[in-house]
Image (cartoon, helix red, strand yellow):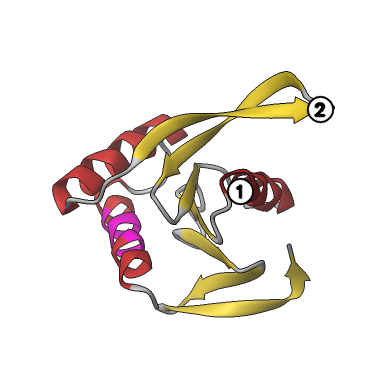
């Protein structure tokens, strides 16, 4: 596992251990920013991402946290679905970044949920390791 990914997983785990489930996404986002600053990791937050159709700007998305080589999407929902994966992949494509990390703080029954998207392949974080998900590629 890449050192930066390891740091991000540690940060997510530390936040979840400290705060637990039940807060809205903004609380976890702010905690993640604090942890990134304390770790000396450079990042951008709430990055506005324009959406174009036939050369016309028709709106925008917003990346939660962008590192130079990783898109991080934070969630606080009961169960991650494909929408979160597709959203993250869209941001990765827009910025030509091959790695995305989706962190879900809202899974009270199963604990912290983390998905890594690396070069188009999904990996679930299970028992301290990222396991490739065979049935879904994005």
Give the image location of residue 30, x and y in percent.
31, 34
Q: Residue at x 73, y 62 (%)?
A: 138
Give the image location of residue 21, x and y in percent.
41, 46
Q: Secondary structure at mark 2?
A: strand
Residue 111 found in image quarter: bottom left
Q: Secondary structure at mark 1?
A: helix
Specify whether 116 is left or right of 105: right
Give the image location of residue 54, x and y in percent.
84, 27
Query: Which residue is denoted by mark 1 in the rendering?
Result: 88
Nearer-N-terminus badge (2/1)? 2
The question of residue 93 being in magenta is answered with no
Count the marks: how many?
2
Specify whether 100 is left or right of 54: left
Residue 6's place in the image compared with 114, above or below, is below
Residues rendered magenta in the picture: 8-14
Residue 103's place in the image compared with 136, above or below, is above
Query: Which residue is denoted by mark 2 in the rendering?
Result: 53
At label 1, counting other C-alpha atoms closer than 10 Å, the crowd grade (few under 14, some 14-19, many 20 or more) is many
Q: Is residue 24 visible?
A: no
Specify whether 55 is left or right of 71: right
Residue 84's place in the image compared with 54, above or below, is below
At label 2, counting other C-alpha atoms closer than 10 Å, the crowd grade (few under 14, some 14-19, many 20 or more) is few
Q: Which of 73/77 is in front?
A: 73
Magenta stretch prevailing secondary structure = helix
Residue 129 marker: none
Residue 112's place in the image compared with 119, above or below, is above
Q: Which of 110/105 is in front?
A: 105
């Amino acid at each position: 596992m890449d050192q930066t990914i390891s740091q991000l997983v540690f940060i997510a785990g530390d936040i979840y251990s400290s705060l637990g489930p039940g807060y809205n996404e903004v609380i976890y986002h702010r905690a993640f920013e604090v942890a990134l600053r304390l770790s000396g990791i450079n990042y951008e937050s709430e990055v506005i991402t324009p959406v174009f159709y036939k050369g016309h700007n028709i709106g925008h998305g917003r990346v939660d946290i962008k590192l130079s080589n990783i898109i991080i999407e934070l969630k606080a929902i009961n169960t991650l679905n494909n929408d979160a994966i597709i959203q993250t992949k869209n941001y990765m494509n827009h910025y030509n970044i091959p790695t995305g990390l989706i962190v879900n703080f809202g899974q009270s029954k199963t604990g912290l949920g983390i998905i890594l998207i690396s070069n188009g392949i999904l990996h679930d974080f299970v028992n301290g390791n990222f396991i490739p998900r065979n049935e879904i590629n994005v």
